[in-house]
Image (tube, coloured by chain):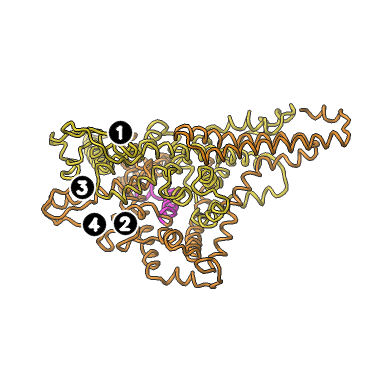
């Protein structure tokens, strides 16, 4: 339908009304079809595979159909109205979903955090007092700090070392791929892998966990690693380091490629050794990258949940903030405390995130 | 270069290579141990370390996979040739569930984010700046904050435990990053590409579908891989919105359940973990370039 056609046509109000009614009818029809699809998916007993395929087609197709119908309806209105409404076909769906899923929940969580378990009575700052004084919560803060320092330090440290080393060898790609591979693995999968490594059998039996096998091989006593106070946190953090080192390595490695070789050559001619060159030329040059990588991993450590949840469920002194929040919400159904902890988590993450975003926008696109 | 200097250089190279090989072995041992254990018979896995297979003794079997993939009644043959029946973990169903959850949870947010990015980048409307600022600000909000309020909404309208519910949740949580990244990309498309199309009287929707989407394929691919990994590997969102034990549970949930209920059955846990890992690892090997780009791009997700 072109604009020229529309202007030439004499439109009586009756025809106009008819057109609007027709548009609305089409819109309602499409929504009805989508609704029928939803009901069918919810109640159907067809085989799993068929349901899955129908669900995928229905979900993806439904969104495309909605875009198309909205566009079609808007283009049936007069040119001026169409022009005004057009942008909202594009940004509207995103704005509605964002409002529902992130914007309003943030405000609501803030509100709920001042109420009791059932969100009925106003309790002032009591939930926040709990969040900062409860012994389990204090334990979480200490542990999160441990995650932040050792987890981030470990991943960035190993990432830097490996990036520096692979930069000097022929098999660079192969080495990097292997170090990077754990990034593809979920925290839950990594949890199983490492539970197996840490598994424990009483002394005298054959150890099937790698760590205890190594310990007993050198004549030590096998240990139940998960119940060792303090050290069990370190064993959990090792998993994060194993997962995230590849990420740090890849980013640092690409930054290393940007260090001008002329400066390094100049350093060599001046007689600087390899370590001196790394310390005085390379590290200062890639410092901004190191900061970006660190902040990204810091955010991950602040929100760490899955590893703790699957490995120790927060027992034996390994609780972290996110696991405490999950427990308050879904085990104790204390919505006030759960919300307050979520707000605390947000407040901890925001400054780091803001800084990270600022750095990211300085990088050229991607 | 003097011969002395070259000798020093060579010695360095050997040291660097040895250190790297040690690190690579340390990094890959966890995965190798998992893979070997997953194909060893139950008795072997539970009584001897997986490294003993390198001595040459011990059998291999696919029974562990049969059991974790099988439904209520998994049938398999043991070492003596007896046919056994045991309750399986039905990971094959969870596998289909994971796909059902993941495919739309990747495509829907990308479609909506691309449309919004196009709108923000190339269309004029009131509140454009304000709305875009809010979108970027939402990047810093961790999704934990939305769990209780959204779960309450879902209970009211009956979306808990439904695929639609979790698609929309992943869409909502993935949108800020998606819009932000695609905006950065789409806003750099040269203006003249659109101008001639606009002059020809093409509607914005046509321009979006015919020009913007095809031109944005590299950015969409990176974002798609990141979102795919994120959704496939996610546990928290699935736990909250799909519920723990229902028929719709995804792989990560099932595996987490297995850890709880079969804490010491390492022959099954290792096989289960490998089933959960296999798709991301394949993506990693075959789409490595996009994979790296996607991870780098996604590093600012809140």
User: Secondary structure beneath disc 3?
Assistant: helix
What label sits on residue A312 in the rendered view? 2
Same chain assignment for discs 4 and 3: yes
User: Secondary structure beneath disc 2?
Assistant: loop
Residue positioned 41% across, 61% down in the render: A324
Labelled pair 3, 2 in contact (Cβ < 8 Å)? no
* Residue bearing mark 3: A210
Is tag 4's residue or tag 3's residue first in the polypeptide sequence? 3
Is tag 3's residue or tag 2's residue first in the polypeptide sequence? 3
Classify mark 4: residues with Cα within 10 Å, few (<14), some (14-19) or many (20+). some
Please say whether residue A61 is visible from this viewpoint: yes
Q: Chain of mark 3?
A: A
Classify mark 1: residues with Cα within 10 Å, few (<14), some (14-19) or many (20+). few
Where residue B257 appears, as percent x and y from the top left, is 35, 49
Residue positioned 70% across, 50% down in the render: B127
Q: Chain of mark 2?
A: A
Identify the hue of chain A.
orange
Q: Between marks 2 and 1, how big is the CA–CA gap? A: 38 Å
Q: Between marks 1 and 3, how big is the CA–CA gap? A: 28 Å
* Residue bearing mark 4: A225
* Residue bearing mark 1: A171
Is tag 2's residue or tag 1's residue first in the polypeptide sequence? 1
Same chain assignment for discs 3 and 2: yes
Classify mark 2: residues with Cα within 10 Å, few (<14), some (14-19) or many (20+). some
Q: Quadrant of residue A267?
A: top left
Viewer-proximal residue, A183 or B146? B146
Q: Is residue A282 magenta?
A: yes
Chain the render paints yellow: B
């Amino acid at each position: 339908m072109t604009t020229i056609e529309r202007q030439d046509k004499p439109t009586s109000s009756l025809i106009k009304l008819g057109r609007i009614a027709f548009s609305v009818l089409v819109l309602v029809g499409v929504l009805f079809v989508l609704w029928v699809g939803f009901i069918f998916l919810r109640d159907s007993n067809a085989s799993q595979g068929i349901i899955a395929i129908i669900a995928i087609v229905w979900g993806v197709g439904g969104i495309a159909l909605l875009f198309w119908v909205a566009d079609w309806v808007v283009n049936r209105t007069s040119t001026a109205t169409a022009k005004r409404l057009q942008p909202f076909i594009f940004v509207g769906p995103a704005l509605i979903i964002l409002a529902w899923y992130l914007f309003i929940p943030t405000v609501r969580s803030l509100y709920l955090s001042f109420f009791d378990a059932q969100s009925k009575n106003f309790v002032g700052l009591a939930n926040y007092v709990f969040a900062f004084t409860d012994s389990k919560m204090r334990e979480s803060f200490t542990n999160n700090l441990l995650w932040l320092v050792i987890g981030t330090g470990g991943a960035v440290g190993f990432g830097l070392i490996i990036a520096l080393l692979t930069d000097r060898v022929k098999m660079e790609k192969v080495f990097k791929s292997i170090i990077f591979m754990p990034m593809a693995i979920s925290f839950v999968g990594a949890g199983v892998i490492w539970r197996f490594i840490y598994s424990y059998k009483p002394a005298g039996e054959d150890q099937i966990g790698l760590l205890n096998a190594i310990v007993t091989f050198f004549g030590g006593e096998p240990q139940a690693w998960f119940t060792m106070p303090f050290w069990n946190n370190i064993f959990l953090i090792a998993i994060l380091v194993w997962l995230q080192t590849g990420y740090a390595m890849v980013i640092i490695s690409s930054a290393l490629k940007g260090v001008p070789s002329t400066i390094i050559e100049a350093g060599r001619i001046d007689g600087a050794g390899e370590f001196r060159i790394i310390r005085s030329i390379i590290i200062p040059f890639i410092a901004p990258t190191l900061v970006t990588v660190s902040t990204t991993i810091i955010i991950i450590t602040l929100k760490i949940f899955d590893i703790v949840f699957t490995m120790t469920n927060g027992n034996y002194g390994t609780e972290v903030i996110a696991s405490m929040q999950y427990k308050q919400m879904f085990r104790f159904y204390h919505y006030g405390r759960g919300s307050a902890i979520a707000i605390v988590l947000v407040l901890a993450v925001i400054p780091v995130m803001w800084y990270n975003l600022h750095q990211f926008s300085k990088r050229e696109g991607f | 270069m003097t011969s002395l200097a070259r000798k020093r250089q060579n010695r360095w190279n050997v040291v660097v290579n040895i250190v790297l090989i040690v690190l690579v072995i340390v990094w890959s041992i966890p995965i190798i141990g998992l893979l070997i254990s997953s194909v060893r018979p139950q008795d072997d896995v539970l009584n001897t370390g997986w490294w003993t297979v390198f001595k040459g003794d011990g059998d291999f079997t696919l029974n562990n996979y049969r059991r974790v993939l099988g439904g209520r009644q998994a049938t398999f043959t043991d070492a003596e040739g007896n046919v056994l029946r045991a309750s399986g973990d039905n990971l094959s169903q969870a596998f289909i569930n994971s796909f059902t959850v993941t495919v739309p949870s990747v495509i829907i947010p990308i479609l909506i984010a691309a449309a919004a990015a196009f709108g923000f980048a190339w269309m004029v409307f009131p509140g454009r700046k304000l709305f875009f600022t809010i979108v970027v600000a939402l990047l810093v909000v961790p999704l934990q904050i939305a769990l209780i309020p959204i779960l309450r909404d879902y209970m009211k309208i009956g979306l808990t435990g439904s695929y639609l519910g979790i698609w929309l949740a992943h869409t909502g949580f993935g949108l800020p990053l998606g819009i932000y990244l695609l905006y950065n990309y789409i806003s750099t498309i040269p203006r003249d590409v659109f101008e001639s199309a606009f002059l020809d009287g093409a509607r914005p929707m046509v321009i979006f579908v015919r020009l913007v989407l095809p031109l944005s394929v590299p950015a969409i691919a990176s974002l798609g891989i990141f979102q795919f990994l994120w959704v496939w590997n996610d546990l928290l969102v699935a736990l909250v919105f799909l519920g723990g034990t229902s028929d719709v549970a995804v792989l990560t949930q099932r595996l987490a359940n297995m850890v709880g209920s079969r804490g010491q059955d390492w022959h099954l846990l290792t096989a289960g973990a490998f089933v959960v890992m296999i798709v991301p690892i394949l993506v990693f090997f075959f789409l490595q370039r996009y994979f790296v780009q996607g991870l780098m791009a996604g590093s600012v997700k809140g």
